[in-house]
Image: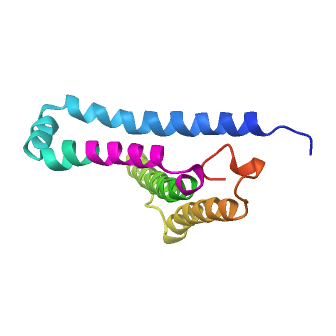
Amino acid sequence: MGVDHAGHDDAASGVDLLGASVHVASTAWFYTVPEIRRYAGAHKARYIYVPVVRIASGAIVAAALPPEPVRWASLGFYGWQFWHFQKQNLGLAALAATATGTARLSRRERAAIVAAGVFGVAALIVRRAGTRPGSASSDHHPTQ
C-alpha cells in the first residue's frame, strides 16, 4: 500500500511492446531472401494485403472503442502471444537438442514446456479477471 505501481506497469508495458515489436519486426528479415520475396509477391493477399488491413482495422477499432473493451480484447492477443512464444521455446529446445547431438526431448520435457505456456496464459486471464473497471490496477496495462 502507498506504493505507486504505475511506473512498474508502464515499464512492463514498454518491455512487452519492445520485445514483441523486435520479435515481429525481425520477420522483415525474411523479405531480404529473394526466394521468399518472390513467394510473398506471388501471394500478395496473404502476405501484404490481409496483414495491412488487419493492422489498420485493429487500430481504428481500438481508437473508436472505450478503454475497457480494448483491454478485454487485448487479453486475447496477449494470451495468443504468450502461447506462440512458448511454442517457439519448445521448438528452440528441440533444435538445441538436435544441434548438440543430445537425445530428443522426452514427452515429460515437452509437456513441461507446453504446461508453462498454458499456465502463463491462465495466469494472464486470472489476473485480468480479478481487476475491476476503473481500478488503479486496470488503468495502466491492457491485460490487468
Q: Nearer the viewer, residue 91 or 3?
A: 3
Determine if the magenta segment contains residue 106: no
Residue plotted at (47% across, 62% down)? 105
Q: In the image, residue 100 lies at what x, y percent?
A: 43, 46
Above or below for 22 versus 98: above
Q: In the image, residue 107 lies at what x, y percent?
A: 49, 71
Residue plotted at (13% across, 31% down)? 34
Is 124 displayed left or right of 38 in the figure?
right
Q: Nearer the viewer, residue 134 or 30?
A: 134
- Majority SS type along the magenta span: helix
Q: Nearer the viewer, residue 127 or 59?
A: 59
Q: Quadrant of residue 75?
A: bottom right
**Magenta residues, start to end:** 52-70
Above or below for 46 versus 106: above
What is the residue that sits farthest to the top in this orientation? 32
Is 13 displayed left or right of 19 in the figure?
right
Q: In the image, residue 112 lies at what x, y percent?
A: 57, 65
Q: Nearer the viewer, residue 76 or 94?
A: 76
Residue plotted at (54% across, 70% down)? 108
Q: In the image, residue 102 lies at what x, y percent?
A: 45, 54
Above or below for 44 versus 76: above
Identify the colour scheme used: rainbow
What is the residue that sits farthest to the right in this orientation? 1
Total marks in image: 0
